[in-house]
Image (spheres, helix red, strand yellow):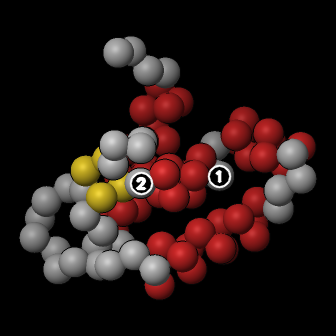
Amino acid sequence: MKISDDLQISLTVAVSEAGRMGHEYAGLEHLLYALTFDDETAEVLQHAGADIDRVRETLTEYLAEELESLEDDGRQPRLTLGV
């Protein structure tokens, strides 16, 4: 399946962030976090009433506190089936 370059970038950011946090998987939370840095997506979210800074802050807290971090074994996180 061919995906857009923008989506590929967002998926790469999601996986990178999951790896930085020591997560085994990159899930929808990681993807939403990555998408908040995409200008077009951020604009859509703002038009829907979202406070982008607050969304990022909430996701950062959730990802750090609620998801288990593993020791760095050098493996890159895998995308969840939901993603």
| On-image quarter of the C terminus | top left
| Coordinates of residue 37 in the picture (x, y in percent) | 62, 51
Instruction: Note whether residue 16 is visible.
Output: no
**Number of numbered markers:** 2
Residue name at image x 57 percent, y 52 percent: 32
Question: Where's the N terminus, which quadrant?
Answer: top left
Task: Name the kind of residue labelled 1 in the image.
Answer: Thr
Q: Position of residue 6 (x, y in %)?
A: 53, 30
Residue 57 location in percent, x, y? 66, 74
Identify the disc placed on residue 36. Answer: 1
Q: Which residue is mark 2?
A: 27
Identify which residue, 5 or 66, lies in the foreground: 66
Residue 18 in the image: above or below residue 32:
below
**29 sits to left or right of 2:** right
Secondary structure category for the residue under label 2 = loop
Mark 1 or 2, closer to the camera: 2
Residue at 76 percent across and 60 percent down: it is 52
Q: Amino acid at mark 2?
A: Gly
Helix, strand or loop under label 1: loop
Q: Look at 49% across and 21% down and name the residue there.
A: 4
Crowding at dot 2, Cα within 10 Å, few <14 / some 14-19 / many 20+, comes out as many
Residue 50 in the image: state x and y as whole percent.
83, 56
Give the quadrant of residue 27. bottom left
Q: Residue furthest bottom?
A: 65
Q: Is residue 36 left or right of residue 5?
A: right
Please tell me in which quadrant of the rendered image residue 38 appears.
top right
Depicted 13 relative to depicted 75: above or below: above
Query: Which residue is situated farthest in the front direction here?
Result: 82
With respect to residue 24, does 11 lie above or below?
A: above
